[in-house]
Image (cartoon, rainbow, N blue to C red):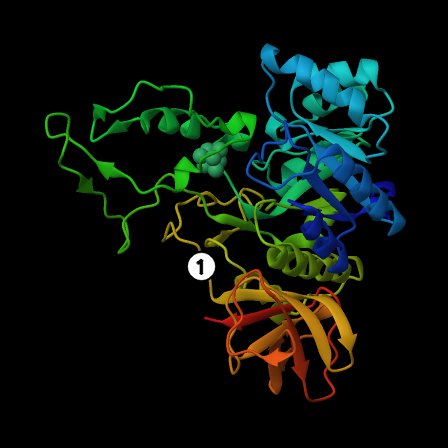
Amino acid sequence: MKNWQHSIELLSPAGSFEKMLFAFEYGADAVYAGAKSFSLREGAANFSLEELAKAVDIAHSRGKKFYLTSNVFFHNSHLKQFKDFLKELVPIPIDGLIVSDLGAITYIREKYPQIPIHVSTQANTTNSEAVRFYEKLGVFRIVLARELTLEEIKVIRDATSLELETFIHGAMCISYSGRCLLSNYFTNLSLYKKGEKIGNMKRLKTRDANLGDCAQSCRWEYYLVEATRKNDFIPIVEEDFGTAILSSKDLNLSAHIKELIDAGVNSFKIEGRMKSAYYAGNVSRVYRYAIDCALANQAPDLERLDELNKISHREYTTGFYLGENQALAAPKTNQYLRDYIFLGYVLEVLDKNSALVQAMNQIKPGSELEIVMPGFQDFVLKNYQLFKEEQAAQIIQPNEQFVLKWDGPEELVKYAILRRKI
Ligand code: SF4
């Protein structure tokens, strides 16, 4: 075994405190999350400094790691706030700070050498010389660009002993390493309607992907408009539904983990800080399983990998890793594929036949209730009843808490997930 294989890790997204707990419960070794600013996911709940300190503490008490993202591209106007933020951050023992901006990396290295720096995928590191450059700067880990093939990763691995991380699952940007101006451009243009200017607030509502506020403009529906017929929106029909020419498929490398380990990857990263706790849990357990199989030299059970089709996703691709030219070909629909509804999760097991549940969507008695468990101990719960304030309930609304009671030997655990097929 080569030395870097000792630190193979499953790294899951933690868009919130709750999602972090799901990721850990379902097998992640580490999570990454944003603070309230600078994290490229302004729309996620993210962590205040107090929450961050608590989250890092919980992660460490479980033997897990916590990485913080600060990977926006800083303008001079952000620097003072960022430097102030670092002063407050430094007492919190995060395991790594994910940064893409060269100025920010240099500043952190000089001022806070104790903070391990992970170079973000946004820095699009694609060759061994770039890795050597970052190595000289004293960084700890490189999150490689998603545009690399397995062969290229092997060449980089042979040139460095730094930790290497790659994305293995989740949404991808159509643009190079996520460096994208579509959102910035189109959110400015949204002040125009049918070609006519309808406001003077240009720039105020601009959403810049490189500052963490992407409007996902690549997933919007587009028409063709001829310059002299501004009211004539001509549909572009690529498939029955319309078109997704600017949109990318989602990455899924669950069947290729062994090749990635052999290529020299240490850390396997799942995208999706804006996704649900169900996503954080279920995707983490699939990749936990896939990594464990790869390390034990066993082929994974495809039925377990198929759980990735039971979360909301776009059509899947293996991206650039296998050298396919069609890696980013547009998906057949710009909608999410969604076969299951996340109904809720167990907050507390009350006794062997009842549990307190947090509802995420509407639940009615009689629906087929699938229980998703860490380690794939799943089952269908048949004989159950729903209770609110000790009264049998005919309907549970989203965000309500209720008591689930069942007859039979089935055992639920805290964070067990309830779902049903659509
Ligand atoms: S608009 Fe699309 S391609 Fe551009 S940054 Fe946002 S998600 Fe990525």
Residue at 31 percent across and 43 percent down: it is 221
Nearer to the camera, 107 or 330: 107
Any part of residue 199 in sight: yes
Quarter residue 85 falls in: top right
Residue where numbered disc 1 is placed: 337
Residue at 23 percent across and 43 percent down: it is 236
In the image, taking residue 291 as reference, residue 43 lies left or right, namely left
In the image, taking residue 420 as reference, residue 273 lies left or right, namely right
Question: Does residue 377 sit above or below 166 in this rendering?
Answer: below
Secondary structure under the numbered disc 1 in the rendered image: loop
Measured as percent of width and height from the top left, residue 240 is found at 26, 56
Quarter residue 54 falls in: top right
Question: Does residue 345 sit above or below 36 in this rendering?
Answer: below
In the image, taking residue 192 as reference, residue 376 lies left or right, namely right
Quarter residue 228 falls in: top left
Measured as percent of width and height from the top left, residue 295 is found at 79, 57
Residue at 64 percent across and 61 percent down: it is 282
Measured as percent of width and height from the top left, residue 283 is found at 64, 57
Residue at 73 percent across and 75 percent down: it is 412
Nearer to the camera, 349 or 323: 349
Nearer to the camera, 204 or 378: 204
